[in-house]
Amino acid sequence: MAKPIEIYRLLLKRFGFLNWWPGETSFEVLVGAILTQQTSWKNVEKAIASLKKEQCLSLECLASINIKSLEKLIRPSGYYKQKARRLKDICSSIKDEYGSIDKLFSLDAQALRKKLLSYKGIGNETADSIVLYAANKPIFVIDAYTKRIMRRINKMPIDISYDSLQEYFEKNVKRDLELYKDMHAQFVELGKSYCKTIPLCDNCPANNICAYYESARSAKQARHA
Ligand code: SF4
């Protein structure tokens, strides 16, 4: 079974340091993490650009803006009615309870995660992305790419839960902010570039430690024997 750090080293060698997540401020990262649900990052960038243009990329503005105006501004991000409602409600709750994003982010990682999960529209992956990339606290983010890659490389169970896989990474990878950030980014890059639904194994940087690739290669050899 390949250790996560071994996989990471192979990916880092191929992709280089990825320097995630784009965003000029912690608040921008939080907004991006909410808007990126079920859409591409390109669409999120357009929505964020509109919010910036209208000088509304702030907790105060998003908590008080008229909902129709917000829908219009974030329309490029898709599901804009639902996202506008959620974004406004989340910002209002943060403003009422904490007064500022810095105060919210002063909670420790687990308390912050729990608080974020209490907001409608924030699930595990979004909460952990905010804790890691916006609040700069080391927590391991799991996403669909990471699940698929670990299922293939290390034969992890198909139905492994978010929490179990997160616990696996956190037990096996030194708790380090920059390492956790870049490791998640590398897994996403591998999932997008090679470990797709139909994997492109022959040029994959992790193929020499991948159980799926090894099985496929052995089966091919057996067929040609
Ligand atoms: S070798 Fe294939 S299955 Fe294994 S990680 Fe790479 S692309 Fe995915």
Image (cartoon, rainbow, N blue to C red):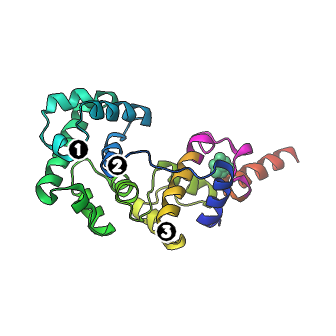
Where residue 196 sits, quadrant-wise, is top right
The local crowd at label 2, few if under 14, some if 14 to 19, many if 20 or more residues have their Cα within 10 Å, is few
The span from disc 2 to disc 3 (Cα, nearest Å) is: 21 Å
Residue 122 percent across, percent down from the top left = 28, 50
Q: Mark 1 points at which residue?
A: 58
* SS of the residue under disc 2: loop
Location of mark 3 (residue): 176
* Left or right for 9, reference 119: right
Q: What element carries label 3?
A: loop
Q: What is the three-letter code of the residue carrying label 3? A: Asp
Which residue of the protein is positioned furthest toward the right in this rendering? 225
- Residue 25 image label: 2
Could you say where residue 145 lies in the image, as x and y percent from the top left?
51, 48
Residue displayed at 14% across by 33% down: 67
Residue 77: say if magenta: no
Q: Does the CB distance between marks 1 and 3 fall below 8 Å?
A: no
- Real-space Cα separation, disc 1 to disc 2, in angstroms: 10 Å
Badge 2 or badge 3: first in the primary sequence: 2
Disc 2 residue type? Thr
The three-letter code of the residue at mark 1 reads: Ser
Nearer-N-terminus badge (1/2): 2
